[in-house]
Image (spheres, rainbow, N blue to C red):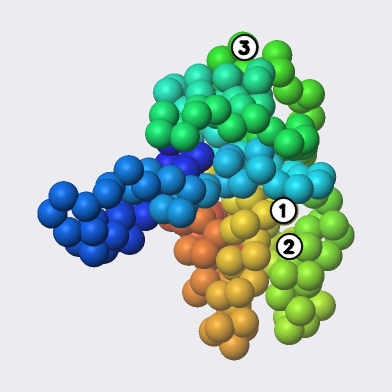
Amino acid sequence: MHQAVYDWDYARQLLALRAAGEGGDTAGLYSREFLLRRPLLDALEHEGPVVLLVDEIDRADDEFEAFLLEFLSDFQVTIPELGTVVARGRPLVVVTSNRTRELHDALKRRCLYHWIDRPSADREMEIVRARLPEISEVIARRVCAAVARLRAEELYKLPGVGETIAWARALLALGDGGLDASLGAALKVREDLDRVREQGVLQSV
C-alpha cells in the first residue's frame, strides 16, 4: 500500500552501506536522499495547484481504500523514518471507478459524484481521431458505428472507448483488413465473439 506514497532506493542504500564499511555511520540511510517519491507524496509536496488522479479505485483492495479515506480526510501521510508530511496545498483529487465492486460509503461521502456516460458516436469519433491522428475519417466513423451496434447487443462485456481506440488501431495495423478480422480488439469474451459472428451483427456496418 505504501508504494503508492513512497519507497526506498534499496540499491543506493546498499551501495552507501558498503561504502561506509563495518562500523560506518548508517544513520542517514533512511533520509530524503534515498527516498523515492510516489504519486501521492508528489501530490502533497507539489508547489502550486495539482490534480491527483486515482484511477479505477474499485480494483484496489480494502486496505488501500481505507488508506485513501484517511488521506482525503487529512491530506497528510506519515513516513515512520521521517515523520508526517502535510500537504502544501490541497490537491484536487479525481477518483474513478468502473463499478466492478461497490465502494465504501465513507469514501463516497467525501466525493462529489459524477456519472460519465458513454460518448455519442460523433464525440467518440473525435476521441479516436485525437488519439490516432493518422486514421482516416472513413475508418474512424466505421469503427464507431460498429461499436455502437455492439453496445446495442446483450453481451457479457460491452466495449468501452478504450476498445474503440484499440479496434481502430488494429484496423490501421491490418491495413483495414475488415471488422471481423480484428473483432478481437473490441470483444474479449469468446461467447461475445461467437454470438456477434453467428448472428451477423456487423454485416451491415
Q: Calculate the distance from the C-alpha at mark 3 to the C-alpha at mark 2.
A: 38 Å
**Residue 57 appears in the rendering:** yes
Q: Which mark is residue 169?
A: none
Q: Which residue is mark 2?
A: 144
Quadrant into which the C terminus falls? bottom right
Position of 36 with respect to 94 (left or right) is: left
Above or below 118: residue 201: below
Q: Nearer the viewer, residue 150 or 6?
A: 6
Image point 78% across, 63% down: which residue? 127
Q: Are marks 1 and 2 in contact (CB under 8 Å)?
A: yes
Q: Name the image quarter holding residue 102.
A: top right
- Going from the N terminus, do you reach mark 1 or mark 3 first? 3
Tell me what residue is drawn at x 34 percent, y 48 percent.
Answer: 29
Q: Earlier in the sequence, mark 3 or mark 2?
A: 3
**Residue ID for mark 1:** 148
Three-letter amino acid code at the position of disc 3:
Ala
